[in-house]
Amino acid sequence: MNLTRRGYAVVALVVVGEVFALAFGAQALNAIVAPVLVALLGAVVQVHRADEPTVDRSAVSPGFPGDTREVSVVADGRGVATLADGAADGLVAEGASDETTLPTELGYTVTLAERGRHKLGPLAVTVSDVLGLVERRFDTRVTTNVLVYPSVHQLAGRERILEKVLDRDAVERQEFDALREYVPGDPLRDVHWKSTAKDPEEMYVTEFADRRIEDSVVIAASCESGYADEMATAAASLAVMALDVDVAVEVRAPSGRVPVGSGIDHRDEVLKLLALTRAGRPAGDATDDVDLQVHADAGGVTLSVGTTTHTIEELTVSRANPLADREVTG
Amino acid sequence: MSAGGESASARARAETRSQFEAAVGAVDRPRALAMTGVVVLVVSSLSVMYRLVDITGQPAVLLLEVAVTLAAATVLSRSMRVRTASVLAAGLFALGLVLYVYSLPRQPPLGPLVTDAVALVTGRSLLQVANVDLWVLGVAPGPLFLTWYLSLRRHYVSAALVGGATLTFLVLTGDAGSVTALLGVVGGVTAIGVGDIEQRGDDIGTAEPLAVLLALMILLPTFATVVPGGPSGSTVGLSTFQEGGTGGAGTVEASLVDAGDQIGVQGNISLSPEARFRVRASSESYWQVGSFDRYTGDGWVRTGESRGYGGDRLEGPPGQSRPISQRVTAVDSLSIVPAAWRPVSGSGAGFDQVSVTTEDGFALGGTLSAGDSYTVQSQAPVADAETLRSAGDDYPEDVESRYTRIPSSTPDRLAERTARITQNADNAYDTARVIERWLENNKEYSLDVDRPDGNVADSFLFEMEAGYCTYFATTMVTMLRSQDIPARLAVGYTPGERVDRDEWVVRGYDAHAWVQVYFPDVGWVRFDPTPAAPRQEAERSELAEAREQNRTDVDLNDTGGGEWTPTATATPAPLTPSDEQAGPPVDDPGGPPTITTRPDDVAPGVLDRVEGSNATAANVTTAGTTGAASAGGGGIDLPSREEATLLGIAAFGLVLGIRRLGAARRLYRVIWVRYQPRSDPPTDAERAYERLEYVLERRYRPRRPGETPRQYLAAVGADERANTVALIRERARYAGEVTREEADRAVDLVDELVAG
């Protein structure tokens, strides 16, 4: 608890008043000095009695660099307070402070800036009395983690990159179990053209009986120190591209691996792994079954598909996030 | 997106909002309240200024000036920048001061001006400033403009600072009373606190703690004085919340003679029988201590500044006069120079520190101890009734401007009544005699009076039946002035006990106030409207009582033997010495009076320096306060408007505070659990059970929703009595039958449980 500027001024006023009264005996000074002293004491009491406010911050869903999120922090308590929410590097918070009376709700916008897991908070609450003479600072402890995925770019040359995979399961496409009508979302390569051509109104899709466990790619990512962001972006772009055509993906990154799988949840897991990964090489020696090898260093990011090597630059169509118009949930 | 906390806090705020805002348009409320605070602060300063201008000039001019200033500030608040406005306000202030200085008859150099300004801040009343109405008119606009401008621009703290500085200045000069100052503080604090709320954008409900704080700020200082040098506040009501409430009735002497350069009219008062000094004089006279020119409505102030006395001969009265030489020996310690009017020279103890006041009397800078003595030569004006009647009304200009003014707020009825009383008198002398006699005959003498609230003279004339010398004299001077006759209040001592042919012993109770009226070519002539017999009676009884108590400071060797005769007149005749047996009048040498040279270094500034005793300010009461009616003094003083406002605010804040603490509810609960009023048996049984549950809840835990009373009582392990009560209540509630005895038993059992 400490005096504010106003508080010091008030103390000075009281002291000067006492001096004047002592020296010159102006009695009505009591009518000025005494109430002011009461106000000061009341301020001390009010601030002293204030409990640490309870803080509740809304959860923030993960997103990509450049995304903005609305954050709402509810502080419960009593009295006049100045609130300031902290944001780690990697997040940019705008309007994260306010001066108001508790209980209150502080809303502001945070921009996700850098890949990684960053902390929002803690909320610094400075409680003062009604006249602003005395204040007391509480550093609450409630923080919220925000996960920022790596940027995802749009890559071209899907057939070329995934041709091995597509070739591989071309062989196994001999048997099929059933024919059914096309449902929007079915991969186009499953369309049974022969039957579709015969029927002017419907499209038909083959439904395979067994799951194609071979219909997957293994992406391995490695990089020199300091190039983890580029590596993550490349790996994520590839993974998203593959998952979009319903190819299962296994990702091996320096920090860990995500086993093969597909679907939106799996994609989020991959993104999460790549968001948190550090620089280096994936653990383990098994490199035989790696289909796509991503490597980032000072020279740029390279993708090795079998014996061919491309740079990610030449494959990148646009840096716009292909997932931007789809819902990315937490 | 947020957790459930949002709804809880939003609900709480909505509740607060609905409690305090019934109507739409809550947006402007904080601003309106903050502006109200500023208005209160400004009004408190302006009320003091209004009083000053009322006493000395035309208050309507001040009001006009205030209106113009506020309008200008309002208009300019939209367009003018803060810096420009500050410069403008400072400029107005400086301009006002310069204009004031040029309005003085002689412009003093810078040095004395600065010292006078410093003296103001250290406690000299503005009432002692010459032309104080012009001073106020010059000084008021600048700070007022800035305060109002700043508050319109939402700089509430700065506005409160400027307004507060003005008020503080008036408090330091002693012209603002405690209640006024407190009201100003309340206004300023409101402006600051609510201004913060407005700037934060909160709603008005958050001002609740501020209201509670204001209540505490108003009430606590009533009970405790924080500032040294003042009498500790008595706890009786708000009307004793003031400086200078004398504990117990002061004495006449203290209220008049010891009070320095301003006196206030008191309430109850007493006489003190101690012997003060002894005079050997060539003739009997009233021993004058000083006189006052400015009437404030509830007191007198001497304006102007004393000058040093170099031992030279002062100017005498303009007409014929005779000398009186006197030798005064102090019996008690004295800080005054009693001497017959008009003193022209003096020497002896204390005369190295004597100064000459603007009223041409001597004032002592130090103190004489018992045994010290001094000599004074006086020239008493001499004129017979015919001379006085034909003196005319061609008064010197400075006399006329100084001694004919009464406060503008004096009711007109005073002048009208005076005119009616004196309608048959066609000259000043006869007018004065008529008024003097009228007051003697129509008003009673009493030391036990309630100090009136308004103008003392008006109250004494129309509402009071009795009073003492200060009241009589004040009223007579006011009545004379209302007829444009220059008159002033004189204070000092009546002759005292004559112990020898030319020697008098003067006691405390001889302190007196009387009237002096100016006649052209004659000078100041004494009149005394106080009825003499009752006064002497009071003095005699006081003396007898003191003698009975064997007090040692009352009698000297030669007193107590009865008055020396032959001419022991009660009140000396109002006319000066031509009626007495003193020697023939002596012409004053020289024609028109020469102006006594004033020392160059002491140019006529604007203030009086500290005079003489300057006893504690305990005897000075200023406007807005009522006397400390301790002993006697019937009735309760009604609070003034300002006090009522403060009490209202305090009450409001207290109510809010109690509500916040939930104290009322808790208090109710405490009573409810202990005492149960009886009605019909089923109700009694039910209530008894409720009390039982409440007690058990506080002691153990509340009953859970699904738990039956039996389960609950078993779970908390309540004793047999509780089970009995529960049983009785069950019967009452479900079986519908319970007897009176059973219900009583239940109540008694619960009473036991509550107690133990």
Image (spheres, helix red, strand yellow):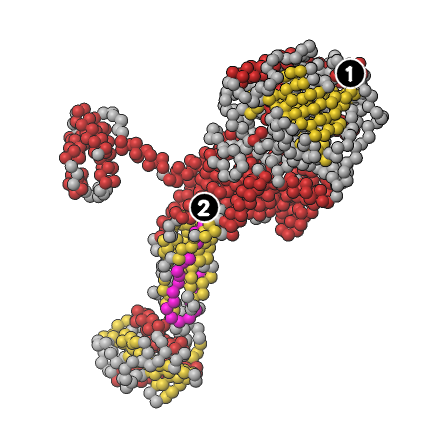
Kindly identify the amino acid type of the residue bearing the numbered disc 1: Gly
| Chain under callout 1 | B
Q: Secondary structure at mark 2?
A: helix
Q: Which residue is mark 1?
A: B583
Residues packed near mark 1 inside 10 Å, few (<14), some (14 to 19) or many (20 plus): few
Callout 1 and callout 2 share a chain? no
Q: Which residues are magenta?
A: A108-130
**Residue A275 placement: quadrant:** bottom left
x, y percentage for residue B623?
59, 30
Instruction: Give the residue type that dot 2 points to.
Output: Ala
Calculate the distance from the C-alpha at mark 1 to the C-alpha at mark 2. 76 Å
Residue B39 on image: x %, y %: 57, 39
Q: Nearer the viewer, residue B195 or B560?
A: B560
Check the picture and name the quadrant holding the C terminus of chain B.
Answer: top left
A319 sits left or right of B733 in the view? right
**Viewed as shown, does residue B169 lie left or right of A135?**
right
Compared to residue A288, the image places residue B746 above or below, namely above
Asked if the magenta segment contains residue A115, the reply would be: yes
Our reading of the magenta stretch's main secondary structure is strand
Along the viewing direction, whichever of A277 and A163 lies nearer the viewer: A277
Can you identify the residue that label 2 sits on? A43
The residue located at (48%, 39%) in the rendering is: B217
Tell me the chain of label 2: A
What residue appears at the point 64 percent right and 39 percent down from the top-left corner?
B120
Q: Residue at position x 65%, y 38% from top?
A: B66
